[in-house]
Image (cartoon, helix red, strand yellow):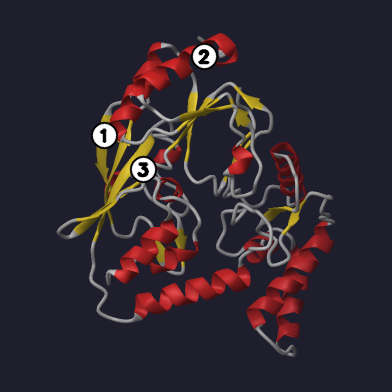
Amino acid sequence: MSLAMLNDTHATGVAQWLSDAGIPFRENFSLARISQIKAGGTPRLFVQPQNMSLLCRFLAYLKQHSIGWIVIGNLSNLLIRSGELNTIVISLKEFRDIDFMDGYVCVGAGVLLPVLAREMETKGYAGFSGLYGVPGSIGGGIFMNASCYGNAVSDYLIDVTFLTEDGDIRVLKRDELSFSWRKSAFHDRFRRCIIVEARFSLIKNEMAVDKLKLTDAHVNRSLYQESAFPNLGSLFATRNIYGEIASHFPVYRALLLCIRIVLHLMPGDRHANFARLATSMTRWYFDIRDTDKVGLSGKTINCVINKGGAEADEIVGFVRNLQGKLQNCVPLEIEIIDRIE
């Protein structure tokens, strides 16, 4: 059965199977209700398996009937098109166990990174405090090798348990997953696989460095990250959005240098002043204009916001237009799924 044929009759059959199997699901559930940017399509079936056994059974059923599916985490860097979705959406939100063992911790894919960072710091373990400001889940964090303030998800990773498209369980060690900046083997080799669990080494924090990182991450998140409007965090995959744009546009680079010179004469927080001036200059230089419902954060050019009531397709259009103005010089960090049945 092709995706386009997931009609009312087929959806009813899947819903009945889910009910019989005891797997929680919702019908015609708007993803805007759980998306970090408050936008997204409405899948006919939104499924939330509670454990790996139920997930494996469901995948086997979907394969048997040739029914399409996608998996989501916290929807913190994923934007799915507007409208009705015939593709089944599977959420791993219920995979949120954190089990401390002798020398390692086992973490479900649905655990939020800030939750794990706080738990690790509370128990006196190092290496995760910088991730406090990353709003994603463990599964999404491993997929994109999330990092912040000197800590990366892959730093203390031992191995990852995941399901293949056929529902087979596999475990691969960190070195087998090709981690690099904002990338892992789950982008290509294991694209259709589902991360369900990960193990991390427990390293005792003998100094106050991690506690300080956690404090800094909390402060910097409130000062420099968008919090007033729904958003998807960093829009582009870059350590320095303004510097990377400058490397492609000579006149822009000269204007950015002028801003840095002016900063030495300005009072107040230099980072906040730079962000404000660089954002304003970038908007002017590339003629970037907000719409009534979609725009860019006032704190950085690297964050798209929902100003109120924007549909996913409106946000996608804004982002695509912005990419065009920047001549696609910086790759996206968020993932857009706009070609889905």
Q: Quadrant of the C terminus?
A: top right
| Direction from residue 313 to residue 227 in the image, left or right | left
Q: Earlier in the sequence, mark 2 or mark 3?
A: 2
* Residue at x-position 23% and y-position 63%: 202
3D distance between C-alphas at marks 1 and 3 = 17 Å
Please identify, in this view, whether the residue under mark 2 or under mark 3 is nearer the observer: 2
Instruction: Indicate the secondary structure of the residue bearing disc 2.
Output: helix
Residue 11 at least partly seen: yes
The image quadrant that residue 51 belongs to is: top left
Q: Are marks 2 and 1 in contact (CB under 8 Å)?
A: no
Q: Amino acid at mark 1?
A: Arg
Q: Amino acid at mark 2?
A: Thr
3D distance between C-alphas at marks 2 and 3 = 26 Å
Residue 219 image position (x, y, % from top left): 54, 75
* Count of numbered circles in the view: 3
Residue for badge 3? 95
What is the residue that sits farthest to the left in this orientation?
Answer: 102
Residue 163 image position (x, y, % from top left): 32, 32
Residue for badge 2? 12
Q: Residues within 10 Å of mark 2 (few under 14, many from 20)?
A: some
- As drawn, 203 above or below 198: below
Q: Earlier in the sequence, mark 2 or mark 1?
A: 2
Residue 271 image position (x, y, % from top left): 64, 78
- As drawn, 28 above or below 5: below
Viewer-side residue, 154 vs 43: 43
Mark sitting on residue 170: 1
Residue 166 at least partly seen: no
